[in-house]
């Protein structure tokens, strides 16, 4: 009898041990995706970019390579083609990715749950800023012989305004509203890369594209047919910033594209690098450090005029949402003064 009781006790003890081991294994597996820079195994960073014809894609994919090269095995990064600002933010908050590029204006609307229908009343509090990168230039492209020379000339025309709800869409709408012609155009909801043939054969009259300059898709179009870029004059800029303070004036230099023989005045927003708020502090600190310590390598590999703007001196220019605590730590160590509204928050 005692022997039976002893056997039962041993069996119960074994079962308890098995449960404890299984529970520990489950816990460790769950924690596997939450490693910081000092723990075993690389932390996986997925960076959402934009279409391959724009600037987000080469910037994001090159940056991912730099993270892999200089993190000493602490980060395993991948840059993926994304659908740009609105979609990238949504996917970060869904957990599909944990980093991405987005415009500063769209990031503000998303974080605060305003303006854009995708975010109205649904603030995306998961996102945090790492750095402001470079100006994203609003480029309004038409054929050289289209007869379209001003924003007002777009009235009654078929105008590609970007994918519906995209950053380009909102830039196009805001600019055309300021010019008083938004309700007079025929909007075509396409990415610029999908609209090039339509421009060439006259199926559409003009197209908006928000991207760093020079933009590959526009370079390709300009190599095939003569183009021009419609200016956004100062009076329209002044109207814009009354409601949308994120815009800055910018000039597209002559020679940026084949056949562009004089400077064109326009406006721009700023691109930002975002991460999910739950990415560990030490990982984001390392991401920020690698970005600025190897920024010259990034610039040379991407090779676009717009990315030459990226520097520690400009890292906070146009910031529109709070910083991640890891990025904030890096900037404090470098002596940068971070405005109170952009200091890390748990909200």
Image: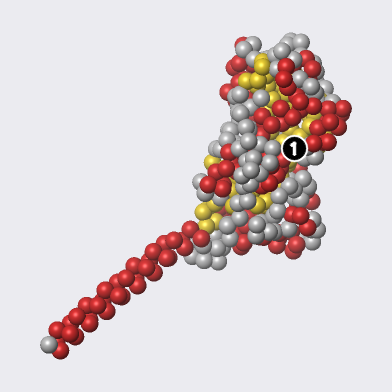
Q: What's the residue at 65%, 20% (across, down)?
A: 187
Q: Position of residue 158 (x, y in %)?
A: 67, 15
For this orientation, the residue located farthest to the left is: 1
Residue furthest to the bottom: 2
Task: Residue 317: give x, y in percent of width and height.
Answer: 78, 47
Up the image or down, 263 lies above or below 286; here it is: above
Q: Where is 282 relative to 55, above or below?
A: below
Name the colour scheme. Answer: secondary structure
Quadrant assignment, res 289: bottom right
Q: Nearer the viewer, residue 317 or 104?
A: 104
The residue furthest front is 121
Depicted 272 relative to depicted 164: above or below: below
Q: Give neighbour class at mark 1: few <14, some 14-19, many 20+ (Cα, 10 Å).
A: many
Query: Which quadrant does the C terminus fall into?
Result: bottom right
Q: Is residue 307 left or right of residue 66?
A: right
Q: Which residue is depicted at the point 58% across and 33% down? A: 52
- Residue beneath the point at 56% across and 47% down: 92
Q: In the rendered view, tell whether residue 11 sits above or below residue 154.
A: below
Is residue 183 at all visible to an observer of this figure? yes
In percent of width and height, residue 346 lies at 65, 60
Q: Nearer the viewer, residue 22 or 270?
A: 22
Which of the 4 quarters of the picture holds residue 308?
A: top right
> Residue at position x 61%, y 24% from top?
189
Given residues 11 and 259, the one toward you in this image is: 11
Which residue is label 1 attached to?
269
Dot 1: element: strand
Name the quarter where the N terminus is drawn.
bottom left
Q: Is residue 258 visible?
A: no
């Amino acid at each position: 009898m005692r022997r039976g009781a002893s056997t039962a006790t041993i069996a119960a003890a074994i079962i308890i041990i098995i449960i404890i081991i299984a529970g520990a294994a489950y816990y460790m597996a769950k924690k596997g995706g939450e490693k910081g820079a000092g723990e075993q195994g690389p932390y996986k960073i997925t960076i959402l970019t934009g279409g391959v014809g724009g600037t987000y894609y080469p910037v994001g994919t090159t940056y991912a390579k730099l993270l892999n090269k200089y993190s000493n095995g602490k980060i395993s990064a991948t840059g993926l083609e994304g659908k740009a600002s609105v979609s990238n933010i949504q996917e970060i908050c869904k957990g599909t990715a944990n980093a991405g590029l987005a415009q500063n204006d769209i990031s503000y609307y998303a974080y605060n749950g305003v303006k854009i229908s995708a975010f109205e009343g649904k603030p995306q509090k998961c996102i945090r800023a790492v750095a402001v990168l470079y100006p994203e230039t609003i480029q309004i492209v038409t054929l050289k012989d289209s007869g379209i020379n001003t924003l007002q000339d777009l009235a009654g025309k078929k105008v590609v305004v970007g994918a519906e709800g995209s950053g380009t869409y909102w830039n196009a709408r805001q600019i055309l509203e300021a010019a008083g012609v938004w309700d007079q155009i025929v909007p075509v909801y396409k990415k610029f890369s999908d609209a090039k043939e339509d421009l060439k054969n006259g199926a559409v009259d003009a197209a908006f594209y928000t991207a760093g300059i020079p933009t590959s898709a526009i370079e390709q179009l300009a190599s095939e047919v003569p183009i021009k870029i419609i200016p956004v004059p100062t009076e329209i800029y002044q109207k814009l910033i009354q409601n949308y303070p994120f815009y800055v004036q910018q000039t597209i230099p002559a020679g940026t594209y084949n056949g562009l023989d004089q400077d064109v005045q326009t406006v721009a927003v700023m691109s930002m690098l975002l991460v999910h708020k739950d990415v560990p502090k030490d990982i984001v600190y390392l991401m920020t450090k690698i970005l600025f310590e190897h920024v010259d390598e990034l610039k040379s590999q991407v090779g676009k005029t717009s990315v030459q703007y990226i520097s520690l001196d400009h890292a906070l220019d146009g910031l529109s949402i709070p910083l991640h605590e890891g990025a904030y730590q890096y900037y404090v160590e470098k002596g940068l003064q971070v405005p109170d509204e952009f200091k890390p928050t748990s909200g």
